[in-house]
Amino acid sequence: MARPPDRLDRRILEELQLDARITNQELAKRVGLSPAPCWRRLKRLESEGFISGYATLLCAPAIGLPIQAYALVTLENHHPQTVEQFDLLVRQRPEVLECHSMSGANDYLLRIVAAGMEAYERFLSTHVLQLSAVRSVNTSFVLRTKKFTTRLPVVEQLGSCPDTSSRCS
């Protein structure tokens, strides 16, 4: 069973969130370790599921995807075949960046990017609304982003070990 991260582990996690391309040498220097123990801690944090991966974050508007939408989706029912039909669409469509199963009046929240309003409407009408599983979709468009971060607060109370079978994949 994985142990909770200690102070040095949390420092490593914080530094990696600031710069995932940092060398082990520089990371070790910043957290006050020599390179070998730092590398061992990093490998343990990866293997125990505290680090789920590394990514390059692209600027969506710069690559031709200026439209960001949040769509609340309600399904017709929650039968396994209905849910699987919806899940398949979500997995296959690159426009869908995130999909969250929600409590409350709606079943899912999707974060979607598109090249323009026409592209979003085409995605919605030819893919999402064509599914018999989907009852309704309510979309809100991002006008301006006031804050965006991928950094999680790595706090002292970070206690329970991650369930490596779940959410971070």
Image (cartoon, grey):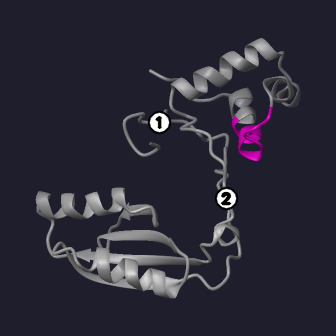
Residue 118 sits above or below residue 123 on the image: below
In space, the residues marked 2 and 1 are separated at their CA atoms by 27 Å
- Relative to 79, is 38 on the left or the right? right
16 drawn magenta: yes
Q: Quadrant of the N terminus?
A: top left
Q: Earlier in the sequence, mark 2 or mark 1?
A: 2
Q: Most prominent secondary structure in the magenta stretch?
A: helix
Q: Amino acid at mark 2?
A: Leu
Q: Locate residue 116 relative to residue 26 in the image: left or right.
A: left
User: Which residues are drawn in magenta?
Assistant: 13-22
Q: Identify which residue, 158 or 122, lies in the foreground.
A: 122
Q: Residues within 10 Å of mark 1 (few under 14, many from 20)?
A: some
For disc 1, the marked residue is 162
> What residue did someone put label 2 on?
58
Residue at figure coordinates x 51%, y 87% from the top left: 117
Q: Secondary structure at mark 2?
A: loop
Residue 8 disc label: none
Residue 105 visible within the image? no
Q: Is residue 14 above or below residue 40?
A: below
- Residue extending furthest toward the top: 36
Q: Position of residue 49 (x, y in %)?
A: 51, 32
Residue 39: where, in percent of width, then height? 71, 19
Between 81 and 128, the one lying in front of the other is 128
Within 10 Å of disc 2 (Cα), the crowding (few <14, some 14-19, many 20+) is: few
Amino acid at circle 1: Pro
